[in-house]
Amino acid sequence: MNILIFNGGRGATSIIKNLKKIKKINITSVVNAYDDGKSTGEIRKYFEMLGPSDIRKVQSIFLDDKNKNYKDFFNYRFEKDITYNKAIDFLRNFEKILKSKFNFKEKLTKELVVFKDIFLNNIYDKQNLFKSDFNFSDCSLINCLYAGSYIVNNRDISKTIYKFKEIFQIKHDVVPNSIDNLNMIALRKDGHVLYSESEIVNLRSNVILHSIFLIDHKKKLDKAKISNLNFEEKLNYFKKINIIPNLNKNLIDKIKLANVIIFSPGTQHSSLLPSYTTNNIGHIIANNRNALKVFITNIGADYENPVYIASDYVANAVKYLDQSSKIKSDANDYINLIIVNHNNKIDSNKVHFDKENLKKFNIKFIAKNFEDKLLKGIHDGE
């Protein structure tokens, strides 16, 4: 059985962990790689590549749980207060550390050392251009190696992902929605502009996001000029420079062959909706008439839009899937089952189950208490 899951970051973790326990299934996790947070932003700036963080997180979940050394390696990060020189010393002793700390064998060690060397050479070259040292604070070690591998693999992110799948013996697949190197911005309903994915993620406000846009990573924006525009002028400007990402060719067959397609919970505008905007992805999903298509709404209030109710999540997904396609489809062509968390208690920190609005989609839904008994706000993946 082929299961394809649109990954919303941590929201999908408990689901994936339980899915991978099932024998004879193939899981494909679809992520967008527009993350540009602190350390990932450094990687993107120095290597002009998509952000590897969400790719790494999902591959880490897919690792064999019995291999603790692999797990520890994928989760290793430099300290938040690490100095540049201390990080460089660590990387210069990289081969010894791989053998002593992680007990890696010779063949794996040699491959990773190549990626490390390419990474270091590239940041040495670019530091003169940027006139500052690479910031290693809280940086994932694997992200640095992804960057080196990206150069080795002729700047092909798909080959880079496959290389790590191969050398770490990962069974399942992580596929970016697109390989186009784009940056994310957002316009809120009050006219405020968020100029990066990290700003969107860190948003804590009741002001709803109106739209997200993807722009060329080299595009320079005149923020002062934009701030003087009214809402409609900002909206029209961003629509003009918005780029619809090209669908990753590796993803097309994955969607067509999927027996189950899951739209997972998670942060909507930063993690999920950008994938739904990918050129023609909605049409390809709609055309797979044989797949069970399941949409799972969030349990806890979305950091980006804490006032969302259950139907808002579905409505936005349908809106962006429609926009991605030349041929408009019915909502139940994209989704034929909605799973909603509901326990008959009123909780302002939980997404409200608005039954009557959900009925308007004409999609079957199941409303039950799907929350983990121990981990509040997290779905019980089993």
Image: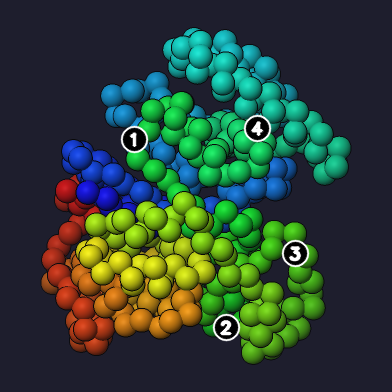
Determine which of the numbered discs, if any, sits on residue 82 in the image: none
Task: Report whether 19 appears left or right of 208.
Answer: left
Q: Earlier in the sequence, mark 2 or mark 4?
A: 4
Q: Secondary structure at mark 2?
A: loop
Determine which of the numbered discs, if any, sits on residue 190 in the image: 2
Instruction: Mark yes or no: residue 17 visible.
Output: yes
Q: Residue at x 20, y 40 (%)?
A: 24
Residue beneath disc 3: 219
Compared with residue 77, is residue 175 higher up or lower down, i.e. above or below?
below
Q: Earlier in the sequence, mark 1 or mark 3?
A: 1
Residue beneath disc 4: 152
Q: Residue at x 46, y 14 (%)?
A: 104
Q: Spatial distance from mark 2 to mark 1, Cα to Cα?
A: 45 Å
Residue beneath disc 1: 171
Q: Earlier in the sequence, mark 4 or mark 3?
A: 4
4 vs 3, front mark: 4
Q: Spatial distance from mark 2 to mark 4, Cα to Cα?
A: 45 Å
Q: Spatial distance from mark 1 to mark 3, Cα to Cα?
A: 38 Å
Q: Label 1 amino acid?
A: Lys
Q: Are the residues flagged by discs 2 and 3 in contact, CB closer than 8 Å?
A: no
2 vs 1, front mark: 1
Q: Spatial distance from mark 4 to mark 3, Cα to Cα?
A: 26 Å
2 vs 4, front mark: 4
Q: Label 4 amino acid?
A: Val
Residue 287 sits in quarter: bottom left
Pick the residue in front: 122 or 166. 166
Q: Are the residues flagged by discs 1 and 3 in contact, CB closer than 8 Å?
A: no
Task: Report whether 94 appears left or right of 98.
Answer: right
Q: Earlier in the sequence, mark 2 or mark 1?
A: 1
Q: Earlier in the sequence, mark 4 or mark 1?
A: 4
